[in-house]
Image (cartoon, rainbow, N blue to C red):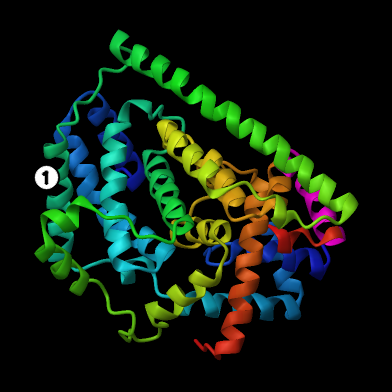
Amino acid sequence: MAKDGNAVIDELATRARAGDREAFSQIVRLMMNKVIALTYRMTGEIESARDLTQDTFLAAYEKLNTFRGEASFKGWLYRIATNKALNHLKSASTRSTALEDAAPQLVAQTASAFPDPEQVTAGKLLIGDILDFMRQLPPQQRLVFELRFYQHMPFEEIARTVGRAEGTVKTHYRQAVAKLRRHAREKGWRS
Amino acid sequence: MNCSDFQDKLALYFGQEELPESLAAHLRQCASCRSLWEEMNSLARVLPDDAAFHPDERSTELLVSQVENALTESAVALPKRGSWLQKLDLATRWQRALPAAAAVALVVAVGWMSYLSGLSTGVDQAAQKPTADTFDILLADSELEEPDSLTLDALLEDFAAGQHLDIGERLLDDISEEEFEYLNSSFDIGDIL
């Protein structure tokens, strides 16, 4: 039977903890788009998402020995990413990054290769619409909405990931959904 | 289960494909709640999915290369798990983090007391907000424990934003969901959180 995504990542993480650098590289390749999409939705900014994603993988590698395997490696990685995104939201100033210093051409290339917030996809809202909505949510509600709706995490795992009680996390999600429904009515979103 | 209870629980399954049987059974019997669930499903379907936020393939490769280069340049060596060197490192980190932890505990205590004081006296709580400098120092120290300092960071974030009332959420973490809902409906805590 084929292993699910979490099992594959967990196995790679076990190998990486044992010193297998190639295993960590595979994790980076498998998780790059998931982490960058998460940080993009959390911050609403392409450049910040790119920087936070790089910081996330570097921190994960550096702290690999602190991963105890009690939860999924993917959840642990998301915890680092969301922690960094929350810290970023807390600060109004944008951090300078080694990436921009080292490779300005890469910044331009990657920024232009992200989906256009105004790009139309049949049957779907614009990604700019959902980014606008998520920007209106308080950080903790935004975080829980991200982990539940986009990462499909059970509330129990979200609670462990964000370090809050499960009841608190559920309340955040209810409030985010209520705001989304209200926002949809105001904007006249139709399926 | 009445419709109010159902709709309260239904929001938790927004974006999920399947409902627990207890909720599905109510849906089969209640046209009004079924209509609400269909409306929520329609909304979930029009939201852009995760892949819509991914960069294109070439850009992903560039980003992967960039991380690989950064890893190589940083020359981070994976510590051997359980080695005496690692234990020494962790012990040192704990010692370095202790003053920050003590400071945070003090700030939490003072913040919570000022919240209680504000409730009883009506004093403007914003006037009691700790200074930005204090938090800069604490935040810098708190990064010693990253990523396990998520809760600490969130707490400091709330303080830095002057949201003293959010401290109550940490205390509410230990109560049951039913108790939380009662407080939520009685005191409008939801808006505070």
Residue in the foreground of this view, choosing between B96 and A8: B96
Instruction: Determine crowd level at label 1: few under 14, some 14-19, many 20+ residues with C-alpha closer than 10 A.
Output: few
Q: Residue at x 18, y 54 (%)?
A: A99
Residue A177 x %, y %: 61, 69
Q: Which residue is drawn at 11% across and 45% down?
A: B69
Q: Is A169 inside the magenta-drawn segment?
A: no
Magenta stretch, main secondary structure class: helix
- The magenta stretch is B171-186
Q: Quadrant of the N terminus of chain B?
A: bottom right
Q: Which residue is drawn at 90% across and 50% down?
A: B120
Secondary structure of the residue carrying numbered label 1: helix
Residue A2 in view, yes or no: no
Q: Which residue is drawn at 30% across and 84% down?
A: A119
Residue in the foreground of this view, choosing between B1 and A170: A170
The residue labelled by disc 1 is: B69
Q: In this view, does A115 lie to the left or right of A38?
A: left
Q: Can you say whether A183 is above or below A55 in the image?
A: below
Residue in the foreground of this view, choosing between A184 and A101: A101
Amino acid on which disc 1 is placed: Asn
Residue A96 x %, y %: 27, 55
Q: Is residue A102 left or right of residue B132?
A: left
Q: Is B178 inside the magenta-drawn segment?
A: yes
